[in-house]
Amino acid sequence: MQIVAESFWLPKIGHTLAEYEDAFCPKTKFNQNVKLFRAAIADGAAETSFSKKWANLLVQKCCMVNDPTQFIQELPKLQTQWYTEVKNQDMPWYAQEKFYLGAYAAMLALKLEENTYEVMAIGDACLFHIRGEHLENCFPLTHSEQFNDRPFLLSSYANNNEEIIANIIVKSGLKWENGDEFYLMTDALACWFLEAYEKNRRPWTKIRALKPSNFKKFIAKLRRTKALHNDDVTLIRVITK
Amino acid sequence: MPYSAEISRANPSCILFMIDQSFSMSDPFGGGDSQIKKKDAVADVINKLLQNFVIKCAKDEGVRDYYYIGVIGYGNQVGPAFGGGLVNREIVPISQIAETPARVEERVKKIPDGAGGIIEQSIKFPVWFDAIASGGTPMCQALLFAQDILLGWLNEHPDCFPPLVINITDGEATDGNPSSIAQNLKSLKSSDGEVLLFNVHLSSYKGIPIQFPATEAGLPEEYAKLLFNMSSILPDSIKETAAKEGYPVSDGTRGFVFNADMVALINFLDIGTRPSNIRQTSQ
């Protein structure tokens, strides 16, 4: 299968590039004939610290494991890695307190094989499966009203994940056809996409038209018109051929 | 929709604390034979609030100035109450509050061990204010002082999330009835809504702590009722978040607590995604 995947990202207005707290994989444009393709995005929670590091660890692991079971088995190692790397920093009192609260992130992973795909999701990052002029599937949220600023997210501390691990949403064996497209989006853009879809505005036409050269302008316009919540934005657009 | 302005470094909001440092604060707190005095409870409440506001705004690289903070003391005199490097400052960016506690104590706290367990460890605990109890209770003057500060703030930040005034007191004003002055303070506004006045009532009455009530029924004394009626009704945006945090709220719910702290309020203020499964560690 021929896969063309491209990622687009921007920090929220008023934040520097270094303050962007989403993460994504693959990092560079992908255009190859493969039997297996993986992509993932994660969205570090704004009210927690060291969440960019946590989001990066999550997407890297998602793009390496075979299935959700293996991901969950590997999670304690990721948590230990995050803990060790952060703890070794010299921290003032407030950073130390934030460290004890842990980092949190929403996460979405896509695994694409010949004819079928699998999705794993925690939180409010969303996958959209487009076929021609139809939204075939969206996941895990299906309506714009489901977004809020208090999602359940994956924590860097195991104690905070007891309910989360049991509720990781996985869908396997879903069918796709040549020419189908998959969009992975963090919450702000996903919410816009669903709102536009609910108003019959075929938002995939906007996503198809995106290039690295016009993405910033596209997002700026959505923010200016209040169609998009001011938040970090990440999109991976996957096109099958 | 009012009370929906984004709180950011480019559009910060303001929190003004008013702390009662009058002689009556040397009375026992919570009634009975309590060894804790109201002045100790005030110091505890203000230090916890400042600590938690700083933690809310802390990120990997430091503390982001989402809020500017002022603390007005009222007792022997009315005026800015910060000491040390912040003496005489009326409004201070929260990053400076974080960097300049009066002292940092060591306390034992239960923290995650990184492997799924909890351990006890000595941690740094900042203290900005110590207990003070001296003079009368010029609450009316303090409210007027707050009004002056906020007039200047709103002039410079006309589109900010409305400033929040948190008055920590036993309610026994000695310079008149503060109700009408409080009403004037609450009528100041930004383009996003009117100033909010919340009250933390620390009483000598023995009674169960009450947080964010919707009526004055059940409040055990006249000062509690006075402060309840002075307090702003929670705006819808804050009320919705409070409900998500598990607090029972209704149309009349006010920013008032009786013999309790108000740290929960900090979680009602929105500066971005806050995970539902985040857990505060115990101290």
Image: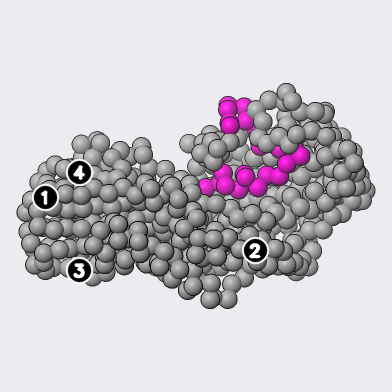
**Callout 2 amino acid:** Glu
Q: Nearer the viewer, mark 1 or mark 2?
A: 2
Q: Report the chain holding disc 2.
A: B
Are discs 3 and 4 less than 8 Å apart at CB?
A: no
How many neighbours does mark 2 have within 10 angstroms: few (below 14), some (14-19), or many (20 or more)? few
Give the number of the disc on residue A29.
Answer: 3
Seen in the picture, residue A203 relative to B103 is either above or below; the reply is: above
Q: Residue A108's spot in the image, x, y percent?
A: 30, 55
Q: Main secondary structure of the magenta part?
A: loop
Q: CA distance from mark 2 to mark 4?
A: 48 Å
Are discs 4 and 1 less than 8 Å apart at CB?
A: no
- Please report the bounds of the magenta region as a residue range: B248-272
Q: Quadrant of residue A52?
A: bottom left
Image quadrant holding the C terminus of chain A, namely: bottom left
Question: Which residue does the numbered mark 4 point to in the structure image?
Answer: A137
Residue at 28%, 40% in the rendered image? A142
Q: Earlier in the sequence, mark 3 or mark 1?
A: 3
**Seen in the image, is B279 located left or right of residue A110?**
right
Residue at 13%, 58% in the rendered image? A113
Q: Report the chain holding disc 4.
A: A
Residue at 83%, 51% in the rendered image? B40
How many neighbours does mark 4 have within 10 angstroms: few (below 14), some (14-19), or many (20 or more)? some
Image quadrant holding the N terminus of chain A, namely: bottom left
Under circle 4, the secondary element is: strand
- Total numbered badges shown on the rendered structure: 4
Question: Which residue does the numbered mark 1 point to in the structure image?
Answer: A176
**Callout 3 amino acid:** Lys
Q: Nearer the viewer, mark 3 or mark 4?
A: 4
Q: Earlier in the sequence, mark 3 or mark 4?
A: 3
How many neighbours does mark 1 have within 10 angstroms: few (below 14), some (14-19), or many (20 or more)? many
How many neighbours does mark 3 have within 10 angstroms: few (below 14), some (14-19), or many (20 or more)? some
